[in-house]
Image: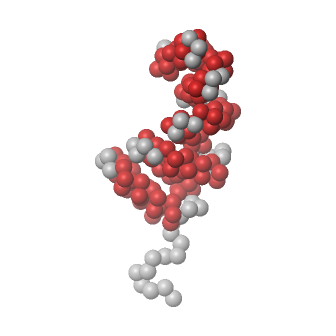
């Protein structure tokens, strides 16, 4: 028989939700390391729960955007997509992959991740960024025609956007031979 006050063998989602809210509060307070530790604890305690899986994306975004840990972030995005490739946060995980690869200066992987993103989410609100990042990756690999195609896509579909400004700069570089 379990002792009075002992932790239950099965933890309900309310406990995972409490940890999620605590991690989010630390993030809002700018306490990114603490938030990261709490997300890691949640994922370790309930690795197969939907809450933990969804928090892998939150953790990955935190690691990428606030802690400059692109490799750690990539692991979280990959784990989420391996468990639930069509999940509600799959778009966030896929753009996270593209950004993490870009941050790690892995242009071949950026191109591959961008292709996957655009295959699954062609009408996404971040598709312009993905096209532009793929253009940058192609240009860095010497594929100036492919890069120019991506930049032109951004300029035609999202004129006046911040990504169009960057794409215009990339297109100019392509025309100048690099």
Q: Quadrant of residue 38?
A: bottom left
Number of numbered labels in the structure image: 0
Is residue 20 depicted above or below 124 in this figure?
below
Residue at (46, 20) in percent of width and height? 162
Find the residue positioned furthest to the right.
119
Residue 117: in sight, yes or no? no
Residue at (56, 62) in percent of width and height? 47
Residue 59: in sight, yes or no? yes
Front residue of this view, candidates 126 and 77: 77
Q: Quadrant of residue 144?
A: top right
Is residue 7 depicted above or below 90 in this figure?
below
Please provide percent x and percent y for residue 113. 63, 37
Front residue of this view, candidates 13 and 166: 166
Residue at (46, 43) in percent of width and height? 64
Is residue 104 depicted above or below 169 in this figure?
below
Please provide percent x and percent y for residue 31. 32, 50
Find the residue positioned furthest to the bottom.
1
Front residue of this view, candidates 10 and 146: 146
Colour pattern of the rendering: secondary structure
Find the residue positioned furthest to the left.
29
Please provide percent x and percent y for residue 107. 59, 33
Residue at (56, 28) in percent of width and height? 133
Please provide percent x and percent y for residue 178. 57, 17
């Amino acid at each position: 028989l379990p002792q009075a006050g002992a932790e239950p063998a099965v933890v309900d989602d309310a406990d995972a939700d409490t940890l999620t809210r605590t991690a989010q509060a630390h993030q809002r307070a700018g306490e990114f390391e603490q938030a990261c530790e709490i997300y890691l604890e949640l994922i370790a305690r309930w690795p197969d729960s939907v809450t933990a899986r969804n928090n892998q994306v939150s953790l990955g975004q935190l690691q990428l955007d606030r802690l400059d840990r692109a490799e750690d972030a990539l692991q979280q995005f990959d784990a989420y997509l391996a468990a639930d490739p069509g999940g509600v946060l799959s778009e966030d995980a896929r753009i996270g992959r593209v950004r993490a690869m870009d941050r790690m200066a892995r242009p071949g992987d950026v191109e591959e991740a961008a292709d996957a993103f655009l295959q699954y989410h062609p009408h996404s609100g971040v598709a312009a960024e993905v096209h532009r990042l793929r253009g940058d990756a192609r240009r860095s690999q010497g594929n100036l025609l492919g890069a120019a195609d991506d930049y032109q896509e951004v300029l035609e579909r999202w004129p006046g956007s911040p990504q169009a400004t960057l794409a215009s700069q990339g297109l100019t570089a392509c025309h100048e031979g690099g």
